[in-house]
Amino acid sequence: MKVYIREATKADLPTLKSFEQGLIRDERPFDPTIRPDPVHYYDLDVLIDDPGTFLVVAEREGELLACGYATRKTPRHYLDHDVYAYFGFMYTRPEYRGLGINGQILQVLRQWARQEGLSEIRLTVYTDNQPAIRAYKKAGFIPHLIEMRLRDDPSAEE
């Protein structure tokens, strides 16, 4: 499905806030540590205004279908790059998933990263989110690092 990808504006905030809640809802099954509602991942006003961040939406016939952003980040001091692009807030309305919209957003974000001189691109995805992992692999991403967690709760031993 061909859509128009454009930079997000303040007028998009109500829809972006609903996308954020959709993303949180979708990620809850993968992460038992997400706090109960109300919860927010992003300060969307700041993302829109940040000159080091490129927040985009996919639009078709006046309806917003998806979003994503790229932002400049500083890596750990021992890595071979001084700055990289981090992609986040990748969300597509459920009824439009599987139609290539996320791939189009990724292409636009990659173009922005190139223009910014950012050749290293990273994103995070839950290991059990296989549809997202397949989409990112299709776009050229490769698995790189697994973050492990342990909730060491002494009261659970009683």
Image (tube, grey):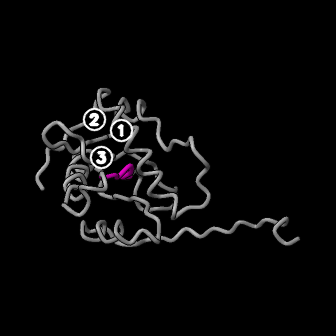
* Secondary structure mainly formed by the magenta segment: strand
Instruction: Name the residue furthest right.
Output: 158
The mark found on residue 151 in the picture is none
Magenta stretch bounds: 86-92
Query: Which residue is tagged 1?
Result: 16
- As drawn, the residue found furthest toward the front would be 95
Callout 3 touching callout 2 (CB < 8 Å): yes
Q: Amino acid at mark 1?
A: Leu
**Pointer 2: residues within 10 angstroms few (<14), some, or many (20+)?**
many
Q: Do the numbered discs 1 and 2 sit on residues whose CB atoms are within 8 Å?
A: yes
**Amino acid identity at mark 3:** Cys
Q: Position of residue 101 (x, y in %)?
A: 21, 55
Residue occupying the point 30% across, 32% down: 12
Marks 1 and 3 in Cβ contact (< 8 Å): yes
Which disc, if any, is residue 67? Answer: 3
Compare marks 1 and 3 and give the one earlier in the sequence.
1
